[in-house]
Image (tube, rainbow, N blue to C red):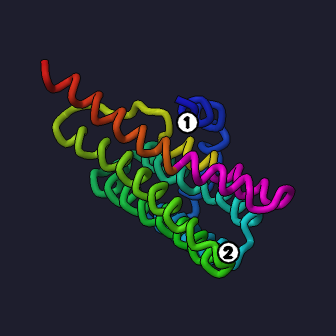
Amino acid sequence: MLSKIVRARAQAFLNVIAAGLHKLGMTPNALTLIGFGFMCGIGVVLALGNFALGGILIIVAGIFDALDGTLARMTNRVTVFGAFLDSTTDRFAEGALFLGMLHAFLQRGMIWVAYVLFFALLGSLMVSYARARAEGIQVECKEGLLTRFERIALLVLGLILTAFFGDLPLLIVLSLLAVFTNVTAVQRIWLVYTVTRR
């Protein structure tokens, strides 16, 4: 999984930052909420049509997304609620990004894009929901084409490329997300089926 490779390479850097934040008295849950607030702010940036800037800011926000878990493990403060809060705010954060893009496209009269965004968001939520429900029945379910890291990476790429090629790269990325997030959800359904039928 791409996210594991990136996290492994960045872990030393994250550890240094997390150690500094710990000295400042920052808690993992506080970092989670700060990161969530940041993502909501990025949603506003996207709503104003600043797609490339929004893409760059998502990269920065991604640091907070990785730091809360790093800080929790470093300080031995990994909790069930912390994991729940992180996962839940991640879903709201994705919703904020899609809502921002929806507003921007509607302002341009591109109503058809709303349907693409709907299926992209639906698929994204179902990928996460399928994993959560699988884990609820003691089945590990992290596989699939587009996990959250890949989804965000594609979205960032599409957003940044709008600075050079207009809306087309973002529309292509959103169309890919609309299809392959739902394919990923089906992959996870199939995985759970194959595991539980034994």
At horizontal 76% and vertical 56% (from top left) the residue drawn is 160
The answer to whether residue 172 is magenta is: yes
Q: What amino acid is at disc 1?
A: Ser
Q: What amino acid is at disc 2?
A: Val
Q: Kindly identify which numbered label has been placed on residue 3.
A: 1
Name above or below for residue 132 compared with residue 23.
above
| Residue 101 in view | yes
What are the residue bounds of the magenta stretch?
A: 155-177
Name above or below for residue 43 compared with residue 90.
below
Name above or below for residue 93 compared with residue 151.
below
Determine the image quadrant of residue 161.
Answer: bottom right
Q: Position of residue 97 (x, y in %)?
A: 56, 66
For disc 2, the marked residue is 45
At horizontal 13% and vertical 23% (from top left) the residue drawn is 197
At horizontal 62% and vertical 59% (from top left) the residue drawn is 61
At horizontal 36% and vertical 41% (from top left) the residue drawn is 185
Q: Kindly identify which numbered label has been placed on residue 145.
A: none
| Residue sitting nearer the eye, 159 or 180 | 180
How far separated are the C-alphas under marks 2 and 1? 26 Å
| Residue sitting nearer the eye, 89 or 53 | 53
The answer to whether residue 58 is magenta is: no
Magenta highlight: main SS: helix
Q: Position of residue 164 (x, y in %)?
A: 86, 56
Q: Position of residue 170 (x, y in %)?
A: 68, 56
SS of the residue under disc 1 = helix
